Image (cartoon, rainbow, N blue to C red):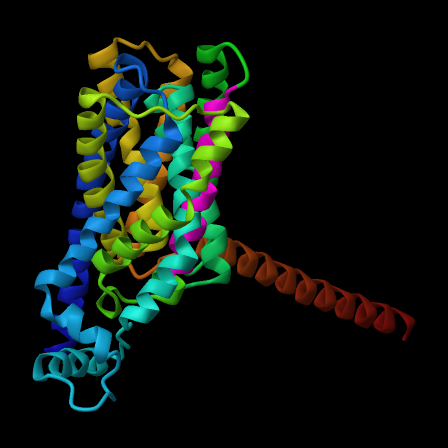
Amino acid sequence: MTRWLETAIEKYRFVFGLFILFIVDLIWVLSSELTKFIYQDADYNKPFFTTYFKTALFSLYLLGFLWKKSWRKMCTAPTLGYEQPTQDIADEHANLDSLGVSRFSVREVSSLAITFCLLWFIGNYSYQAALSDTEAGIVNVLSSSSSLFTLIFAAFLPSSTLDRFTLSKLVAVILSIIGVALVSYSDLKIEKGFPVGAIWSLVGAVSYAGYLVVFKYKVNDESALDIRMFFGFVGLMNTIILWPGFFLLHFSGEESFQLPNRNQFLYILVNGLVGTVVSEALWLWGCFLTSSLVGTLAMSLTIPLSMLADGIVKGIDYSFLFYIGAIPLLFAFVAVTVLSKFDNADPVGDWIKRICCRKLENTDRDKVKHESEQREFLLSESDSAL
């Protein structure tokens, strides 16, 4: 009965994680379209400022220290072994200990945020810079190539059995890369030049994959860390560390510093609160409930949604090759989801093993047959000699 209940809970977590990732995809598509609107229609093409401001909004999560008593207690009672912890904190740690999970202290969460803040900012800034150079649909397709880097990184730093490397996952990711290659080729035709936005998208894909895999390796259970507190510290650290970037970009001529007007600020604020503060926390939660690879492949669902949005809102006509390239990307996501659902099934690996075993059996059979024929031949030769 207990085993059945654990299996049911695990399946519920996985399905719920997929639902969360789908909601995040919807938010990201709307956010990317709003970002393009800010850059082009609202005439505020400042990727660094918008990324810095939206990242700084993560700091709003730290207001939780004002009303969450458990957060404040963690500042003075970081571990269960601390003298006389409150009953609520003790119960919370006892529940985590029963699950084999160690709770991160506030100091540990802030240290973790320092480690990951730059990597997260690079990934997010690359995405924003890509949107300033190319269409949202193409950016989302190329960003979904993070699945390849996630598979590679997770093979060296697996956080759970769901991140285990299999040949079936490799085939799915290869199909995803084929789709990326087709879309990149259509990107060259659409932009009629070197796809700078495509390069930014791939840089962001590598950064996101590295950030997610290493983070899940260090924090293998969402119960061990409050995701909101983590992102709150990420926002605070980015705000403190990255402000010199304004001077660097301004005096280098890459991005002149200019404050947005009232309407531009309102667009950036709404986009930051919904498209960054809420969506990033939901995405990381969804990755914990599923797996690193499923979380990154879920980005591919933004492809048809972005196409639909670009077609309806902007009337953009993508080439037939673009749509063909999107098919293997979607197939890869579905395939990895199904494989993870069935306890990391590896049909490709099993098929190759069966072929190899069959060849070995045939080789052994041929060898035995050949030896038998040789013996019969030698016996017949011996009889003839007699």
Relative depth, front residue between 369 and 180:
180
To which quarter of the image does residue 63 belong? bottom left
Q: Where the N terminus falls, by quadrant?
A: bottom left
Residue 230: give x, y in percent of width and height: 28, 58
Residue 57: give x, y in percent of width and height: 24, 43
Residue 209 painted magenta: yes
Residue 321: give x, y in percent of width and height: 42, 17
Relative depth, front residue between 386 and 132:
132
Outermost residue, bottom direction?
83
Outermost residue, right direction?
385
At 43% from the left and 23% from the top, the residue drawn is 256
The magenta segment is 195-216
Q: Is residue 105 above or below residue 125?
A: below
Relative depth, front residue between 379 and 272:
272
To which quarter of the image does residue 104 belong? bottom left
Q: Is residue 239 above or below residue 1?
A: above
Q: Is residue 165 above or below residue 18?
A: below
In the image, taking residue 231 as reference, residue 371 lies left or right, namely right
Q: Where the C terminus falls, by quadrant?
A: bottom right
Q: Main secondary structure of the magenta part?
A: helix
In the image, taking residue 278 as reference, residue 197 lies left or right, namely right
Relative depth, front residue between 337 and 345:
337
Asked if residue 325 shows in the view, the reply is yes
Q: Is residue 241 above or below residue 138?
A: below
